[in-house]
Structures are given as structure tokens and as C-alpha cells.
Image (spheres, helix red, strand yellow):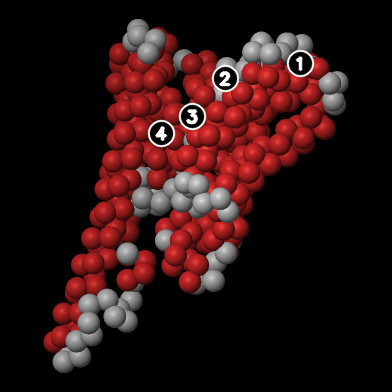
Amino acid sequence: MSEIARALSFRNISALYIFVAMFAVFSIWVPDTFLQWDTWKALLDSQAVTAILAVGLVVALSAGAFDLAIGAELGFGSILIAWMAVEKGVSVPVAIVLTLAAGGLVGLVNGVLVVRARIDSFIATLGMSSILLALIAWVSGSQQILGLPGGFQKIGSTELLGLTLPVYLVLVVGLIVWYVLERTPVGRRVYATGGNPEAARLAGVRVASVVVGAFVACGTIAALAGVLVSANLGTGDPTIGPAYLLPAFSAAFLGSTQFRGGRFNVWGTVVAVVVLATGVKGLQLAGAPIWIPELFNGAALLLAVGLAKYEATASRAGAVRRLLRFDRRNDKDGDAPTLGAGAPGVARGS
């Protein structure tokens, strides 16, 4: 019963309880619009790109790296596929593959800057973001690229069981990333690197390779999100990328407080995307000002980071309490090791 109580506790699934509360409030406040299927369909369709981008960000964050270029990477992917398909006449399948490869290459450069040049990931990716925005402006001439092939636009508009393909792609990408992070040795190395890179290195993990690989995966997924943006809009928009940065980080950090006790995870992040979008949509339907999304996402990010720090502090405090209880038991048995020497769980709790 204790496991069930912990799983259903507010601390573990607070986002779900918040979602239920918001759903009840907005159902009473604006029932004529909030409860319509078209509203929820539009919400899920519009948030599919954010969810995919946030899942990609989870990979980098799990490895202890901050990719502040992820919004620009999305914008670069969006404009690159439009430029190749329209300006260069590249077939859609080839253009998609090349765009994903370009996203992976951007991630590779980010990784090399961090692990080889030893530039902090904040600075490296912030600089890369500026470079990518310049490339976007150069490639597009700071103008929208129109005339994308109709077949390509169907990627964003084709519906299956009432939902567009990007919504299903969220599940596909989420399942792949979840499986890699939670069910494979690669995922364990990623989490070990993000938790304590020095301890991971001493345990035989090739930390540099893990960080570079996380950046590559993040860049590739961001490029995929950019492809979907262009497919949804039917154009290549050079201004679209930066607007996704804050929602992606808000969802990833809020998601880290769900299900996994302070650890970045895929399904917590997807749930966080839906919860944040529900709050914004409900307020918009109620007549809130146009700047509400920025306020809501910014406040959510601050709250999520605070909760994530609290989770980490609580986890360390719990490890210390377990260690002290272990030492007291040994004291009673007449065998008192020095604090931390040979006691289990020290590395995990530190």
C-alpha cells in the first residue's frame, strides 16, 4: 500500500491533479468553448511540435547538458527543408533526411564545443543559437519561403482517428526515447553522466561520448520538430524557432518532477506539455490578454525549476538520513565505520 500511496501522492503526480483542477475550473468558467472537441483537437495538434522538442531536450538535460539553441535548431530545420524543397527542388524524402542530418551535425558541433573546447553548455549553445539565427536569416533572406509541395504539407494535415499525424509522432518519438533512456545500458549511462559525471567516469562510462551523443540526438529531434512546423504552416518561417524555447524548457523541468522523483523523463514531460497548454488555452478562452502564454510559461518554468531543486535536495537528505541510521545500527553492534566509509548508497545520494 505504501508504494501505491507514493505513486498517487501529490508530490509524484502533481501535474495530473493540477490538470484535473484546471479542467474543472474552465469547464465551469467557459463550458461552451472549453468542452468542445474542436478545442482539444486544436490544442493537441498545436502542442505536438512542442512535445517532440521537449522530448529531445530531455535527452540533453538527462546527460547534464543545457541546449539553449534548441529553439534555433527547430527554426533552422524548418527553414532548411523549405529552402531545399522550394529553392533547390530536392525531393521531400531526401530533404527530410538531409534536414535531420543537419540537425544532428549542429548537435555534434555543440557536443564538441562542450567536451573538447570545454565551453560551458550554456555559453556554447547560446552562441550556437545566435549563429543559427544568422544562418536562417541568410538562407531565407529574412522572408518566408512559400510554395512547399502539397505532399509535404499533408504530413502536418493528414488525420487519423480525428488527430493529425504529428500527434502520433509524439508517441513514436516518445516511445523510442523512453525505451533508450529507461530500458537500455545507453540510457543508464546518460542518467549516470547527468547525475555525477565524475563518478560515471570512474565507473567506466565514456562521459564525453555520452554528452556528444545526447547533443546529437537533441539536435536531430529538434530538426524533426522543425520539419513538422513547416509542414503545419505550409511555409518556411524564419522567425518561428525562438518562441519554442521557453515552452520546451518549462515542460522538461516540470516533467522532471513527475513520476520519476526529480529525474528528467519522457512521459512526465509530455504530460507537462498538455497541462501547460491546457492552462494557457483555458485562460485565452476566458478572455485573458495576449501576453498570457509568455507569463504562464515563464512562471511555470520558475516553479518547475524550484520543484526540481526541492526534489534533488529531498533526495540527498533522504540518503543522508538512511546513512545515519545505518551508522547508528553499527554503533549499537559495536562496529562503527567512519561516516560514509563503505556505507551503501553514498554515491547515489551524493
| The one of 157 and 115 positioned closer to us in this rendering | 115
Q: Residue 321 location in percent, x, y?
A: 20, 67
Q: Secondary structure at mark 4?
A: helix
Residue 258, picture quadrant: top left
* Residue type, numbered disc 2: Ile
The alpha-carbon separation of the residues under discs 2 and 4 comes to 18 Å
> In the image, which disc is placed on residue 240?
2
Mark 3 or 4, which is nearer the eye?
Answer: 3
| On screen, residue 252 above or below 71 | below
Query: Which quadrant holds the C terminus?
Result: bottom left
Q: Residue 281 location in percent, x, y?
A: 41, 18
| First along the sequence among labels 1 and 4 | 1
- Residue 260 in the figure: left or right of residue 18: right
Q: Secondary structure at mark 3?
A: helix
The residue tagged 1 is 148
Identified at 45% across, 29% down, the residue is: 247
Mark 1 or 3, which is nearer the eye?
Answer: 3
Q: Residues within 10 Å of mark 4 (few under 14, many from 20)?
A: many
* Residue type, numbered disc 4: Ser
The residue tagged 4 is 250
Hey, which residue is sitting farthest bottom in the picture? 334
Mark 2 or 4, which is nearer the eye?
Answer: 2
Q: Residue 209 location in percent, x, y?
A: 60, 58
Identified at 41% across, 33% down, the residue is: 250
Identified at 80% across, 17% down, the residue is: 86
The alpha-carbon separation of the residues under discs 3 and 4 comes to 9 Å
